[in-house]
Image (cartoon, rainbow, N blue to C red):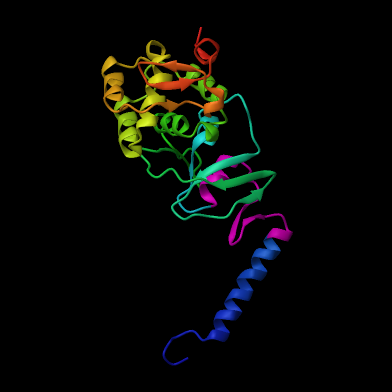
């Protein structure tokens, strides 16, 4: 080639050579095929590392974030992952990786303890707000309140939570957040001003903590309907 360009035939040769090398390394157990176009060293089996590095800018969200922070009681064989590029659900090593958007990321936590790969996860404060917003993606109400019961004092950043609430801009989420976190105010070390901020944004509409057929008790302060046994059953000791 005089002009230095690569012909279509040469491109095909390069592609086939690379494909052959990948196949050979996979056959020899050096590489594992994770998803289309993505291979990892076979020794890499940590599901959190796989989730965050097999997709573009991967980030653990919802219940997967709770699990990362060890705030879960249930373990699932799937992970919720946010990516800047939506991806199709894929499976690897008996785990299923599912794309779930969050709409925003505020100060995500990045674990770089592995020199080659990193774990990226929503901050604890955003994780709590996201899970309150989508209780089903948190593993259900019981899973969520158990997580709140295990969050230590001073672990939640009020400013971050307010940023998240403002980003969501949903009155029902302000209602849910105010109701649930007020049950743990002392335990979490949350200020009165945080709840005053929530109250200002709840409006006059009635909201539901869970599907309306499950809710038969009304909380006047937060204008929210909750399961009858909700406060008694989920209140921390």
Residue 35 in the magenta stretch? The answer is: yes
- Which residue is depicted at the point 45% across and 50% down? 57
Q: Position of residue 103 (x, y in %)?
A: 40, 45
- The residue most toward the right is 27
Q: Is residue 138 visible?
A: yes
Residue 196, picture quadrant: top left
- The residue most toward the bottom is 2
- Which residue is depicted at the point 65% across and 67% down? 21
Q: Is residue 70 visible?
A: no
Say left or right for 198 vs 21. Answer: left
Given residues 199 and 31, the one toward you in this image is: 199
Q: Is residue 194 above or below residue 132?
A: above
Residue 170, picture quadrant: top left
Q: Position of residue 19 (x, y in %)?
A: 64, 69
- Which residue is depicted at the point 39% across and 30% down? 172
Residue 58 in the magenta stretch? The answer is: no
Q: Is residue 102 above or below residue 33?
A: above
Q: Is residue 28 above or below residue 137?
A: below
Given residues 167 and 33, the one toward you in this image is: 167
Q: Which residues are magenta?
A: 26-54
């Amino acid at each position: 080639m005089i002009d230095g360009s690569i012909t279509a035939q040469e491109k095909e040769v390069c592609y086939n050579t690379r494909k052959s090398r990948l196949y050979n390394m996979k056959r020899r157990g050096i590489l594992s095929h994770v998803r289309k176009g993505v291979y990892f060293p076979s020794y890499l089996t940590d599901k959190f590392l796989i989730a965050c590095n097999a997709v573009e800018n991967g980030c653990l969200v919802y219940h997967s974030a709770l699990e990362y922070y060890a705030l879960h009681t249930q373990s699932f064989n799937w992970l919720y992952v946010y990516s800047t590029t939506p991806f199709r659900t894929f499976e690897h090593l008996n785990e299923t990786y599912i794309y779930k958007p969050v709409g925003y990321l505020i100060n995500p936590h990045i674990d770089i303890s592995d020199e080659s790969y990193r774990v990226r996860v929503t901050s604890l404060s955003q994780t709590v707000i996201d899970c309150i917003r989508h209780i089903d993606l948190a593993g259900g109400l019981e899973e969520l309140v158990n997580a709140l019961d295990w969050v230590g004092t001073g672990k939640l950043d009020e400013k971050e939570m307010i940023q998240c609430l403002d980003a969501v801009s949903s009155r029902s989420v302000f209602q849910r957040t105010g109701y649930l976190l007020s049950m743990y105010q002392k335990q979490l070390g949350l200020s009165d001003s945080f709840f005053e901020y929530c109250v200002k944004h709840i409006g006059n509409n009635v909201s539901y903590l869970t599907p309306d057929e499950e809710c038969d008790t009304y909380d006047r302060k937060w204008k929210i309907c909750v399961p009858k046994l909700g406060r008694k059953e989920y209140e921390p000791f």
